[in-house]
Image: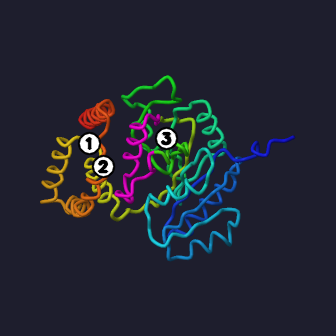
């Protein structure tokens, strides 16, 4: 007798979006053409442009869930919970996966049981240039663990990442205090602190076609969340240094001032959920920071 579970999908795709209907529809065109035919769940972060209706009309094969308010990156958590496949790939409304990439990733997860998150290579725009983060991930000073399929890293692009569902849910997914903007670092830290591997696997490829224009507010959110991540996970000495640095910058830099203003009301929640990193992991973070500083000086 045929095992009915044999045909069950191994990997699905969660897409988050907000008020970018046409970009999303194009992304779904690409995901629909994948040979893996993965189940796709769209999380609509309270769009006001008819996104959900357009998806149901043009892509009835894709599931869509409309959220009453913008949950930011936490919408991905809801998608992982609902989708139920052993592995879940993330796409944004301007990114998709190379044909065959998801099958390749599923095989890597099957063979490497400690792998909690796979950071793919990212090709940007119609020309397919490598995202600058790829080189940083490939040359990670953390080396390559024997039970992982690529260099150990503590950073990634959410729109070019794939997670083991059990690992992701174990650590709580993307953190609600951050909402959106540079949320990847904290998830990588939490996975590593729980003993899961985070590895860069450049043989798995995602495509990212962001809007060429400016992205208002993004740098502010990233700087805000860097400080909040520090309050959530780093030693008090580091919290004091980074906080003082942002306060000094805020005196003469409007973006720094906005980042600080955005962080301050969230610090009580960060304190309530503070969980410092294990010492060995903190040493790895310091090693990455020192390598990054040396690289910037070399330039």
User: For the image shown, how many numbered marks are present on the structure?
Assistant: 3
The residue wearing badge 3 is: 119
Task: Report whether 179 appears left or right of 68.
Answer: left
Q: Is mark 1 on a helix, strand or loop?
A: loop
Q: Which of marks 1 and 3 is nearer the N terminus?
A: 3
In which quarter of the view is residue 137 placed? top left
The residue wearing badge 1 is: 234
Can you tell which mark lies on residue 137?
none
Q: What stretch is highlighted in magenta?
A: 171-198
Mark 2 vs mark 3: give the one in front: 2
Kindly identify the residue that appears in the image at 56 percent across and 30 percent down.
Answer: 112
Q: Earlier in the sequence, mark 2 or mark 3?
A: 3
Residue lying furthest front? 272
* Quarter of the image where the C terminus is located: top left
Task: Report whether 197 appears left or right of 176.
Answer: right
Asked whether disc 2 touches disc 1, contact meaning CB atoms under 8 Å apart, the reply is: yes
Image vertical order of residue 247 relative to residue 281, above or below: below
Q: Which of marks 2 and 1 is nearer the N terminus?
A: 2
In which quarter of the view is residue 236 placed? top left
């Amino acid at each position: 007798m045929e095992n009915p579970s044999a045909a069950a999908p191994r990997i699905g795709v969660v897409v988050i979006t907000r008020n970018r209907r046409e970009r999303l529809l194009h992304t779904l065109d690409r995901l629909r053409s994948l040979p893996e035919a993965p189940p796709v769940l769209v999380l609509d972060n309270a769009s006001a442009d008819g996104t959900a209706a357009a998806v149901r009309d043009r892509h009835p094969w894709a599931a869509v869930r409309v959220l009453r308010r913008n949950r930011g990156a936490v919408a991905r958590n809801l998608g992982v919970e609902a989708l139920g496949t052993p592995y879940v790939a993330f796409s944004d409304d301007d990114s998709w996966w190379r044909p065959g990439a998801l099958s390749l990733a599923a095989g890597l997860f099957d063979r490497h049981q400690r792998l909690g998150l796979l950071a793919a290579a990212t090709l940007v725009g119609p020309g397919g240039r490598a995202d600058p983060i790829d080189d940083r991930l490939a040359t990670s000073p953390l080396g390559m663990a024997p039970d992982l399929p690529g260099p150990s890293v503590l950073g990634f692009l959410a729109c070019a990442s794939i997670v083991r569902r059990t690992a992701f849910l174990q650590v709580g997914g993307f953190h609600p205090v951050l909402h959106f903007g540079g949320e990847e670092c904290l998830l990588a830290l939490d996975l590593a602190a729980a003993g899961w591997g985070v590895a860069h696997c450049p043989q798995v490829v995602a495509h990212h076609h962001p809007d060429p224009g400016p992205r208002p507010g993004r740098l502010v959110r990233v700087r805000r969340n860097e400080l909040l991540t520090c309050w959530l996970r780093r030693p008090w000495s580091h919290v004091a240094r980074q906080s003082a640095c942002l306060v000094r910058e805020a005196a003469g830099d409007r973006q720094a001032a906005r980042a600080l203003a955005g962080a301050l009301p969230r610090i009580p929640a960060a304190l309530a959920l503070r969980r410092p990193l294990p010492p060995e992991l903190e040493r790895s973070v310091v090693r990455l920071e020192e390598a990054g500083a040396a690289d910037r000086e070399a330039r």
